[in-house]
């Protein structure tokens, strides 16, 4: 988190190549002297990093094709950016603005903010989880530190078979009952389960459990606790 900057290093030697400060104004227009870099991910389609600056709420799209003449696009979202993950298409990056109770979705193809979605208290997705909901189509899931739900957000798809789900895009389509204190949600392409942990829950029995197993049965979830 410190100092307020991101550093570019040689991938083989780890020698520093460039240091870029993140000091600047917040989305509210106030100057912040020490904004932390919360997370950095690399685009899978072009030479670009997505840099999330926590306190300012600014998302930087950094073109690293020419390090000496670095180009960066600044996108305003919401303050207190944290961690996030890609949607199934790998076009959109969804990041939690946790203390703002929002999820920001960045379109890395257009270089613009695609959506700012209001969600339950203190979202904490880790990388989140993608799967196809039988009613709402492709969705991205996040858990919450401060709420007893797992939130499902509809995400866009270029697949023609998913065109019927377009009306739901960037909306919270379902809140699945869970317990507070969740840090990570996970699934697998060959699984019909979504796993959600609860290591920050004050109940010691819930802390010791690997998590909640959420399974689709028709159009609803069934929930079962996995053993210690």
Image (spheres, rainbow, N blue to C red):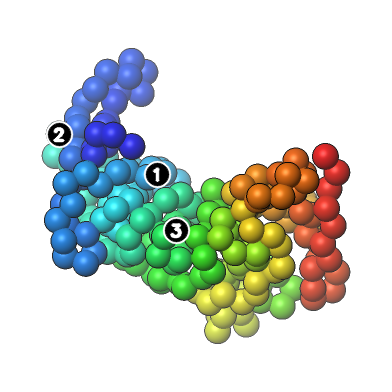
How far across and down, in percent of the image, does residue 27 sit? Answer: 24, 64
How far across and down, in percent of the image, does residue 223 sit? Answer: 82, 62
- Residue at left 51%, top 70%? 119
Q: Earlier in the sequence, mark 1 or mark 2?
A: 1
* Relative side of 189 to 59, left or right: right
Q: Earlier in the sequence, mark 2 or mark 3?
A: 2
**Relative height, residue 100 to residue 213 (above, below):** below
* Relative side of 55 to 205, left or right: left
Q: Nearer the viewer, residue 10 or 39?
A: 39
Q: Nearer the viewer, residue 73 or 51?
A: 51
How far across and down, in percent of the image, does residue 15 sit? Answer: 27, 18
Instruction: Determine which of the numbered discs, if any, sits on residue 68 in the image.
Output: 2
* Relative side of 213 to 54, left or right: right
Label 3 belongs to which residue? 98
Evaluate whether residue 32 shows in this view.
Answer: yes
Circle count: 3
Q: Residues within 10 Å of mark 2 (few under 14, many from 20)?
A: few
Instruction: Determine which of the numbered discs, if any, sits on residue 8 in the image.
Output: none
Q: Nearer the viewer, residue 214 or 137?
A: 214
Cβ atoms under marks 1 and 2 closer than 8 Å: no
Mark 1–mark 3 distance (CA, rounded to whole Å): 13 Å
Query: Please, what secondary structure does the residue beneath circle 1 have?
Result: strand
Cβ atoms under marks 2 and 3 closer than 8 Å: no
Instruction: Determine which of the numbered discs, if any, sits on residue 39 in the image.
Output: 1
**Relative height, residue 63 to residue 176 (above, below):** above
Residue sitting at the far top: 13
Mark 1–mark 2 distance (CA, rounded to whole Å): 23 Å
* Relative side of 127 to 38, left or right: right
Quadrant containing the C terminus in the rendered view: top right
Quadrant containing the N terminus in the rendered view: top left
Q: Earlier in the sequence, mark 1 or mark 3?
A: 1
């Amino acid at each position: 988190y410190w100092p307020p900057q991101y550093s570019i290093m040689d991938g083989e030697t780890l020698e520093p190549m460039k240091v870029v400060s993140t000091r600047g104004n917040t989305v509210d227009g106030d100057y912040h002297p020490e904004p932390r870099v919360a997370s950095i991910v690399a685009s899978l389609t072009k030479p670009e990093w997505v840099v999330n600056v926590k306190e300012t709420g600014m998302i930087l799209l950094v073109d690293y094709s020419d390090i000496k003449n670095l180009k960066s696009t600044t996108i305003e979202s919401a303050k207190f950016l944290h961690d996030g993950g890609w949607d199934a298409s790998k076009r959109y990056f969804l990041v939690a603005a946790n203390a703002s109770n929002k999820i920001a979705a960045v379109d890395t193809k257009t270089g613009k903010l695609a959506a700012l979605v209001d969600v339950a208290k203190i979202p904490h997705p880790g990388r989140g989880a993608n799967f196809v909901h039988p009613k709402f189509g492709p969705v991205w899931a996040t858990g919450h530190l401060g709420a007893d739900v797992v939130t499902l957000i509809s995400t866009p798809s270029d697949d023609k078979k998913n065109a019927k789900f377009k009306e739901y895009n960037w909306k919270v389509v379902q809140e699945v009952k869970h317990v507070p204190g969740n840090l990570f949600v996970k699934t697998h392409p060959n699984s019909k389960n979504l796993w959600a942990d609860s290591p920050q829950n004050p109940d010691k029995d819930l802390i010791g459990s690997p998590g909640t197993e959420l399974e689709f049965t028709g159009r609803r979830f069934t929930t079962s606790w996995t053993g210690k």
